[in-house]
Amino acid sequence: MTRWVLHVDLDQFIAAVEVLRHPELRGRPVVVGGDGDPTKRGVVSTASYEARAHGVHSGLPLRTAARRLPDAVFLPVDRAAYEEASESVMAVLRDSGAVVEVLGWDEAFLGVDVEDPEAFARSLAASVLDATQLDCTVGIGENKLQAKIATGFGKPAGVFRLTFGNWFPVLGSLPTDALWGIGAKTARKLAGLGINTVSELAAADPDALAVVFGPMTGPWLVLLGRGRGDAEVDDSPYVAKGHGKEETFQQNITDWPRVQAEVARIAGLLAVDLAGEERPAVRVVVKVRYAPFITETHGVTLPSPGSDAAVIERAALAALDRFTGRRPVRLLGVRAEFGSGPSDS
């Protein structure tokens, strides 16, 4: 028996749940976001594959999505429906006998000891489909990094194995941002050092990257390039690291005192939600999205952990003071990041 890490990722999850609820939408471009009104400000939560073919994707402004695909079906976000579907899927995964580490609504890592991981993966996907009518893709690897990336090669509704044995044949010539954990900003910084591909990153000098990216991040990037990562799957219950609230304004806010007032109001709403949390907040982060679509965040660490409304509001306003821009604002958000438990309070 060999220990394998599997990454199960539900295909176009939110859109797929909506199609199950509205079978007449099957095969049509479906876009889910906001309250479902594309004339209002908001962003796409997810889009069906039919919509993605026209350049509509998560995070895109709803109005832009409507311009790109005016014939799409726009639906409001229904969190309760997605949570219910997700719980059904995770129950199937746990019934497989594997160790299951839930990552969110639509994905999880599994740890299994099997001789034929492809057969196990295909059986698992079939079980999910039979129980929930939802398709999923399964990535197989010797660690989480490999399994997560493998899923992308298996989409949609497929199975793909990525190991040390085929790491470089599959990924070697691809750009560095093909790796889980490397975004566009880091990729650009690496390119500035002459490191453009996964193979070049794997061959880089860890000490040289430590000078540019820091003593921890630099060597870690080289390990990513070599396909090395954590192989331990933890089935501890999923615990959110924070909780936030945000609001998109249909008209830009140009008056900064009103921005301050709105941040204070949103912080108050957040504090109401935090009252049911056993964990205290340790940090408060404010997000500002300027018009047309430039987002910045700043945060402050609380002097001592807590979730009192006055504390959250003061911290949010202190974080807002760190913004130097006074441009028109279209979205504001306040997020509380939690400590480890009640003992932190």
Image: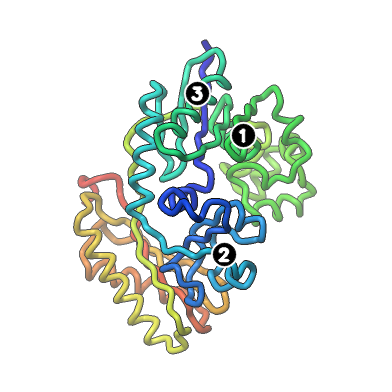
Q: How many marks?
A: 3
Circle 1 sits on which residue? 150
SS category of the residue bearing label 1: helix
Which residue is at a point 58% across and 71% down the rendered structure image?
66
Q: Amino acid at mark 3?
A: Ser
Answer above or below: position of 95 versus 193.
Answer: above
Q: Nearer the viewer, mark 1 or mark 2?
A: 2
Say few, some or many: other residues with alpha carbon within 10 Å of mark 1 (under 14 / 14 to 19 / 20 or more).
many
Locate residue 334, reporting x and y percent.
37, 67
Residue 305 sits in which quadrant? bottom left
Alpha-carbon distance for marks 3 and 1? 17 Å
- Discs 3, 1 touching: Cβ within 8 Å: no
Disc sitting over residue 282 in the figure: none
Q: Nearer the viewer, mark 3 or mark 1?
A: 3
Mark sitting earlier along the chain (3/1): 3
The answer to whether residue 17 is visible is: yes
Which residue extends farthest top? 1
Q: Amino acid at mark 1?
A: Ala
Which residue is at a point 50% across and 30% down the rendered structure image?
125
Q: Of residues 147 and 309, which is closer to you in this image?
A: 147
Mark sitting earlier along the chain (2/3): 2
Residue 185 sits in which quadrant? bottom right
Q: Amino acid at mark 2?
A: Ala
Mark sitting earlier along the chain (1/2): 2
Circle 2 sits on which residue? 72
Circle 3 sits on which residue? 123
Q: Of residues 95 and 339, which is closer to you in this image?
A: 95
